[in-house]
Amino acid sequence: MGAVFIPSEFGVIFLPLANVQVKAGDKLRITCQYTHRGKAESQPLYASIGKTGWTGFDEVLHASKTLSVPEDASWQAREAYVDIAITTSISAGVYDLYAKIGGTFPKVISPTLQDVVEVTEIGDSDFGEISITDYAKV
Amino acid sequence: MAKYADIIKIDAPSSAIDGATVIVDVSVKNIGTSDQNLAVTAVFDSTSFPFQFDYLLVLPGQTVIFRGWFTMPSKNVGITAWSWYWEGSEWVQDDRYEKQVSLSQATSEFGSIEIIRYERR
């Protein structure tokens, strides 16, 4: 009796990135993967936290750093990161993220990650508990 | 092993863009015990290219540089250089040396970017 051969198959698995909580004073490190080919050059890597609206991406906080890319004879995937300082100028809420390479006229722009950054407010001063850990004659 | 005209090295860029002039310096040492007329010929892939001097009279132990040049084509190329010495009635091929020059891109392109991680620091 013959057997039916079913080829192995992999479909698309969608793994949503988890939310991250930040507050004023933190830094958010955004790591990007990009592809490049051609001569070496330096370009800004730029990332922003904001909200996507009908007029586009409304940036609230952003940061950039200079990316020095070596010469690549063929397409090469590389990683780089940029840190956005979370300041009090952003109010509590849930925000989106995007990144790009290039200045005024970006060379590439990432897809926007929706609702991935939750900015929390720093609460009032609060003491949780107290206990005696040592005592001695002085 | 060379008899008289020992090619010590070839100085040339490891990469060049299409259309660039590639300078090739071939260092040749007279390893004989008497003065020798030495010459160099070379090709990139199968195309010969010129040198500044046809030949030079070289003292024993002396190293001279033969400078050649060619225009970089739109592909990687291999340089092969040969040294020659004059035997009184004809040129005799002596040593051989090879070097690769890869084509470098004149432009730079970014294909895509995506955020793969974000974390609080």
Image (tube, coloured by chain):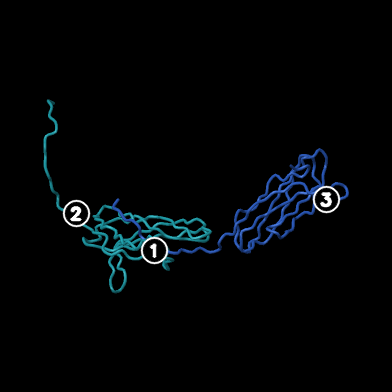
Chain colours: A cyan, B blue
Looking at the image, the residue that sits furthest to the bottom is: A54
Subunit ID for the residue under disc 3: B
> Element at badge 1?
strand
The quarter of the picture where the C terminus of chain A appears is top left
Question: What residue lies at 53% left-to-right and 59% top-to-bottom?
Answer: A73
Graded by Cα atoms within 10 Å as few (under 14), some (14 to 19) or many (20 or more), the crowding at tag 2 reads few
Q: Is residue B51 above or below residue B9?
A: below
Subunit ID for the residue under disc 2: A
Instruction: Report the disc number at residue B91.
Output: 3
- Cα distance in 3D space between marks 3 and 2: 87 Å
Residue A99, given in percent of the width and then of the height, sits at: 36, 62
Q: Quadrant of residue B115?
A: bottom left
- Cα distance in 3D space between marks 2 and 1: 30 Å
Q: Is residue A112 above or below residue B90?
A: below
Q: Are marks 2 and 1 on the same chain?
A: yes
* Marked residue nearer the N-terminal end (2 or 1): 1
Q: Amino acid at mark 3?
A: Trp
Looking at the image, the residue that sits furthest to the top is: A137
Graded by Cα atoms within 10 Å as few (under 14), some (14 to 19) or many (20 or more), the crowding at tag 3 reads some
Q: Quadrant of residue B114?
A: bottom left
Instruction: Report the disc number at residue A100.
Output: 1
Residue closest to the eye, A15 or A48: A15
Q: Amino acid at mark 2?
A: Ile
Q: Amino acid at mark 1?
A: Lys
Residue closest to the eye, A48 or B46: B46
Nearer mark to the viewer, of 2 and 1: 1
Subunit ID for the residue under disc 1: A
Left or right: A120 with respect to A8?
Answer: left
Instruction: Report the disc number at residue A122.
Output: 2
The quarter of the picture where the N terminus of chain A appears is bottom left
